Image (cartoon, grey):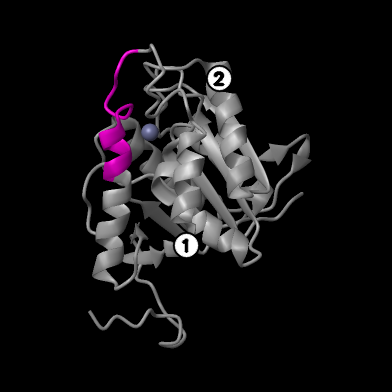
Amino acid sequence: MQQLDILAFGAHPDDVELGCAGTILAAVAEGKKVGIIDLTKGELGTRGTVAIRLKEAQEASKILGVAIRENVGMADGFFKNDQEHQLAIIECIRKFQPTIVLCNAPEDRHPDHGRAASLIADACFLAGLSKIQTSHQGVAQAAWRPANVFHYIQSRNLLPSFVVDISAHMDKKMESILAHSSQFYDPTSTEPNTFISGNSFLEFVKGRAKELGQQIGVDYAEGFISNKLIGVKSFDGIIQNKT
Ligand SMILES: [Zn+2]
């Protein structure tokens, strides 16, 4: 069993890169163990194929320096927040025992994102109930509840509970996004254009990070929503913002 500090879930194979790659890169640089679990293979995506997207996700994982990346193979567009799906996520949480879970935005343009957010948040709570029995490779799992679930912000301009300075990691974040080359801007591609395939979408991703960074007096940042109140031990970790 490989215990992780942070486990990031995404409904689709590029959600984690778009929403929180900078924060993951910053955590890995600090020596934290981080993993990614994609809920679906993104099989309904207009561009690319399941095989191409899996390969791209592995490529992006190398850039991010994560310890594991798995895909639980739920149905793109149609997975539900029900007992069957919750048990699958509970098994993942108990397997990796993360302190912090990152997942999709509570509501977003793509309906899978909000559903994934509820599914992951509910499963994180339920994973702590010992009377819910799960096993991994035939071995019974112990109950485990992550301390915090943070929702990364995606398309909708939601108000974050806190923002993370990713200035030192912005270039690598963009590199990890572009590893999903079937999905994003590629002037040589002959595939149909989509909401995310134009250069303007990449500019939007940078613009969002710039805008959040600007508000805390740094170059680039990623925003997160917490349903629980966040506590700090001291003022030392807070970025001095004299803007
Ligand atoms: Zn998505």
Instruction: Inspect this view and state whether residue 97 appears.
Output: yes
Residue behind mark 2: 52
Residue 129 magenta-highlighted: no
Residue 200 magenta-highlighted: yes
Residue behind mark 1: 148
Is residue 211 toward the left or the right of residue 141 in the image? Answer: left
Q: Is residue 88 above or below residue 43?
A: below
The residue under the point 61% across, 63% down is 29
Disc on the earlier residue, 1 or 2: 2
Q: Quadrant of the C terminus?
A: bottom left
Q: Is residue 122 above or below residue 4?
A: above
Q: Nearer the viewer, residue 141 or 9?
A: 9
Q: Neighbour class for label 1 at 10 Å: few (<14), some, many (≥20)?
A: many
Question: Between marks 1 and 2, how big is the CA–CA gap?
Answer: 33 Å
Picture quadrant of ligand 1: top left
Which of the two discs, 1 and 2, sits closer to the camera?
2
Is residue 107 toward the left or the right of residue 80 in the image? Answer: left
Q: Secondary structure at mark 1?
A: strand
Going by the numbered disc 2, the residue's amino acid type is: Ile
Give the x, y percent position of residue 178.
46, 35
Instruction: Inspect this view and state whether residue 146 appears.
Output: no
Q: Is residue 169 above or below residue 30?
A: above
Q: Which residues are magenta?
A: 192-204
Is residue 232 toward the left or the right of residue 213 in the image? Answer: right
The residue under the point 64% across, 42% down is 62
The residue under the point 49% across, 42% down is 175
Q: Quadrant of residue 136?
A: top right
Q: Neighbour class for label 2 at 10 Å: few (<14), some, many (≥20)?
A: some
Specify the farthest residue to the front: 188
Give the x, y percent position of residue 82.
43, 32
Q: Secondary structure at mark 2?
A: helix
